[in-house]
Amino acid sequence: MKNKGKHIALGVYLLLTALPLLAGIVYAFLTSIGLTDGLSKGFTLSHWLWAFQTPELWQSLGFSIYIAAMALGLALGLAFTMISFFRFELEKGVLSRVIYMPLAIPAAVAAFFSFQMLSASGLLSRLLYQIGWIDSISQFPELINDAWGLGIILTHALMAFPFLTLVLLNLYRSKRLSELSELAATLGAKTKDTQMKVIFPILMKGIMPTLGLFFLFILGSYEIPMLLGRQDPQMITLLTLRKLQRFDLTVIPQAYVVALFYVLLVLLVMLLGLKGEKIRAYAD
Amino acid sequence: MRIKPILLFLLIILLVLPFVVLPFLSLVKGYRFPQIWPEEFTLTHWGSLFQQRFGLGKSLGLSALLSLSVAVLVTLLGFFTSRHVAYSPYKNRWLLMAYFPFILSPVVYGAFLLYYFIHFNLNGQLLGVIMAQVLLIYPFTIILFTNFWDHRLKAFEELSITLGGTSWQTFYKVLLPIAKKIMLLCLFQSFLLSWFEYGLTSIIGMGKVQTLTINVFYFVGEANIYFAALAACLLILPPVFILYFNKKWVLR
Amino acid sequence: MSYLKVEHLSKYFGETPVLQDLSFAIEKGKTLSILGKSGCGKTTLLKILAGLLSMDEGNITLGEQQMNEVSPAKRGVVYLYQEPLLFPHLNVVKNISFGLEIKGWDNSLIASRCIEMVHQLGLQGHEKKMPEELSGGQKQRVAFGRAIITNPAVILLDEPFGNLDVQIRGDMQLFFKQLVSAYGITTLFVTHDLKEALKVGDQMALMTEGQLKTYQSQKEFLLDPNTGAGEELAFWENLKR
């Protein structure tokens, strides 16, 4: 009886996690080599060759990594600045409450909000016009649908930094950094030494798993680049869907090639992360 | 030079700005560059919530129904199945699978699943979107609940049994009361995950299941920023409400 | 006359033997102290006796009845953990009455038994408190009371005083001894503390790496060099000189 319950539970778990994922990947792979639908002419490697012969996929992968790294770097910088300058304010007062507010904003809304703020006719542009910094709409710098993905990076960074700040704040308490700083001071460390040799390394180590997850979240994000990005270069999720939802059905296998490459990339990041974890675990 | 108070002030402005700008945009009319202050404020956009032809009221109801069903379903499923995952000798290997849907991006996961949803005729339907969201959010509840089933809880179960309790009594009188808090947390968080979801919903729902997130982009596409802002306001209302009562319920 | 009897009990985890051919018996109403270091298999033994783990070989009898296949809920063997695991959602009285309520006792009967037990435990005035409002010693008393009130055939104690301060620890050992003798409950007590084993136990045993050695008397136990008692005695003798 007891074992029956266990088997049912683990069965449901597999049915809802591994099975759909595996089934999806198998179908995607078969389609990518031309073995599934009626449109294809049988086994072919042409779709995989397409990936190697044209730069589209590589540009998209590169662009996605660039966006995720930049946004995360910016967010992390902001978060560290926050807890260096405003740690007291983050514990008490208005800031301690409003820092949670961005967590109530979904990506779809964040994308729309950024669009309204940063576009050429947006609120920021109007403000600059009113105070006389620009004379016409065309003078406002391109922050939306720009080649460098500035709008995407900025929006992701603004969404991520309050969360990262809260994680750092939590680490600050749980790792007893105030006490450790005092200890370092009694051992003769200057403020700067304490910051660089005690606080920063401990926080960085603690926040690594969160950073890894956020990197993957931004890498696979969709709403924000959809509204704020341009068609070329395009983040990987958008490229996948553009090819999947084309009227030209012969492009669909390419969509799956892109998606499978993405899975490989994620697995690689994960393996690196897990390996890092293990090395750290041994070091401890 | 006291620069810190100024920075703090700007920071607070930045953090609350969306909660000012979005309601503002939902209340204005004929708002064109380079105006900062609009010609006219109006309640007509909000009034359209009660008019059928715009479909916003219906969209709100649909989103609420969808997210509630998904939240209840995954919380119950997660609670019962996570116990066996957590107590398995291969816990970590089992758990790895639960991370995939999110780190793989809901959109890519959706692309993989689409064929099967079309095959079973579930695409473009509410039921299909519920199922797809369950596939996405259920693994998250497993991650949440496996921390709950620890040695201490196992000891509580054993204690109850040696004191003469049956499995049902142990479940009902011990596990459920202790689990109440985390189940509530799970319910709220999975509700929000569903409420915020866009990518998977748009792929499987094919634009026919018009949730609020879908509508934000629909109205942006129609260049109707007032309605898009209104839909955005409706989207952030429940999380703000939940945040007001308990910060933990929103922090993921 | 032995009450709890264990014969040739063995347990393997995979290929590794955890308990090897254990045999012992406890007389009714007496306490057997088992001295053993952590990792010697003490907890595994207790969980097998409670029915929470299965054994690979052996025989357990309680009174006249064979226990091998009896479910944990029906054994009347209560296992007490190292920490006084109180149900966090129940107050003192509700924790104590848990076992009786589960058995479907009449409410007025439960109430009268609880009043009696709270008095025994010296917890008057704390009846409505929640676990987090109690001190370590008070929690331990509640845990004892909760076990004893169900009138179990056997109580198994897994280092129950390990988390207490030295001062309270001594009091609780004494208190526990009085409590089990008042209710005439057969007890198996495991600890890694030599003095505690001697203080609480009527019968003695030593466990090392999954094997158990029993002794006829406390004196025999003290004379065995393996228990470490000799060394301790010698230390005190030296100090006196």
Image: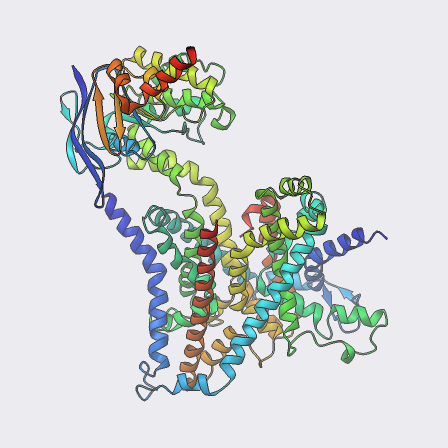
In this view of the protein, which residue sits in the foreground, B36 or C148?
C148
User: Compared to A136, does B85 lie above or below?
Assistant: above
Of all residues, the one furthest to the front in this rendering is: C241
Q: Is the residue C129 above or below the residue C19 in the image?
A: above
Percent from the top left, x then y, of residue A77? 66, 60
A208 or C138, which lies in front?
Answer: A208
Most foreground residue, B84 or C17: C17
Q: Is residue C85 above or below residue A123?
A: above
Pinpoint residue B175: horizontal percent, then vertical percent. 38, 38
Q: Is residue B147 left or right of residue B61?
A: left
Q: Position of residue A29 (x, y in %)?
A: 35, 76
Q: How many marks?
A: 0
Residue drawn at x 74%, y 76% as measured from the top left:
A141
| Res B135 quadrant in image | bottom left
Q: Is residue B155 left or right of residue B37?
A: left
Can residue A189 be seen here?
yes
